């Protein structure tokens, strides 16, 4: 298990990262940029979709009311790791659920902000699912922020979905 500390928006966040999860030794550039770009103004409900070790959700819980922050991941090890990190960082009240996308989240919960750094597969299946689910789970005026490597490729496929 790796351990690292990082500073985000004036908060020091300590992460104990399972070596099997994405970026076990520090925050990747794409996720850092997404966090720094995302607006948290007028946000009540928040989702860290595909939370991994929980960095994004923990940061959101430091800004918002922790009970209104949700994190989910399909990987049981990621969920356990994210819950542990939430406890370490004093935001254990947030909601962390094992879920394939948003499938296991309560249907009545909708979000003002969703942040995601999906796994990259040639068939676009994971990001496509997350984009579709986000469309139906965002509150009016809500926003999805997603890390992409090939923006044009994603934009064409998003247009084809809707």
Image (tube, helix red, strand yellow):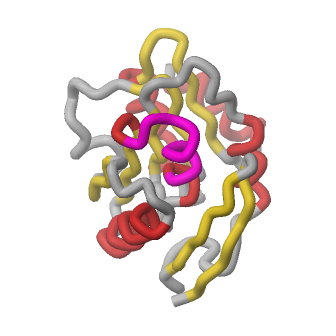
Residue at left offset 72%, top offset 53% = 8
Which is more toward the observer, 94 or 74?
94
Q: What percent of the width, then of the height, locates residue 135?
A: 45, 23
Q: Is residue 25 magenta?
A: no
Residue at left offset 57%, top offset 39% = 63
Q: Splitting the image into 4 quarters, where does residue 79 fall? A: bottom left
Residue 151 in view in this figure: yes
Q: Is residue 136 left or right of residue 42?
A: left
Q: Is residue 38 left or right of residue 83?
A: right
Looking at the picture, does residue 120 appear above or below residue 142? below
Q: What percent of the width, then of the height, locates residue 25?
A: 67, 80
Q: Which residues are magenta?
A: 58-66
Residue at left offset 37%, top offset 52% = 72
Number of numbered discs on residues: 0
Residue at left offset 42%, top offset 65% = 82
SS majority, magenta: helix
Which is more toward the observer, 62 or 156?
62
Q: What percent of the width, then of the height, locates residue 27?
A: 70, 66
Q: Splitting the image into 4 quarters, where does residue 14 fall? A: bottom right
Q: Is residue 73 left or right of residue 36?
A: left
Q: Is residue 59 magenta?
A: yes
Q: Splitting the image into 4 quarters, where does residue 39 fall? A: top right
Q: What percent of the width, then of the height, locates residue 99?
A: 28, 53
Looking at the picture, does residue 65 appear above or below residue 81? above
């Amino acid at each position: 298990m790796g351990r690292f500390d990082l500073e985000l928006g004036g908060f020091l966040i300590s992460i104990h990262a399972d070596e099997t999860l994405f970026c076990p030794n520090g925050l990747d550039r794409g996720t850092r940029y997404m966090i720094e770009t995302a607006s948290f103004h007028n946000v009540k409900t928040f989702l860290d979709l595909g939370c991994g070790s929980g960095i994004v959700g923990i940061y959101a819980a430091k800004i918002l009311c922790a009970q209104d922050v949700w994190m989910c991941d399909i990987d049981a090890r990621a969920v356990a790791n994210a819950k542990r990190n939430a406890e370490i960082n004093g935001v254990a009240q947030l909601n962390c659920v094992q879920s394939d996308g948003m499938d296991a989240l309560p249907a009545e919960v909708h979000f003002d902000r969703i942040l995601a750094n999906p796994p990259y597969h040639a068939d676009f299946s994971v990001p496509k699912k997350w984009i579709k689910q986000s469309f139906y789970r965002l509150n009016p005026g809500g926003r999805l922020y997603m890390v992409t490597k090939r923006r044009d490729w994603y934009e064409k496929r998003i247009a084809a979905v809707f």
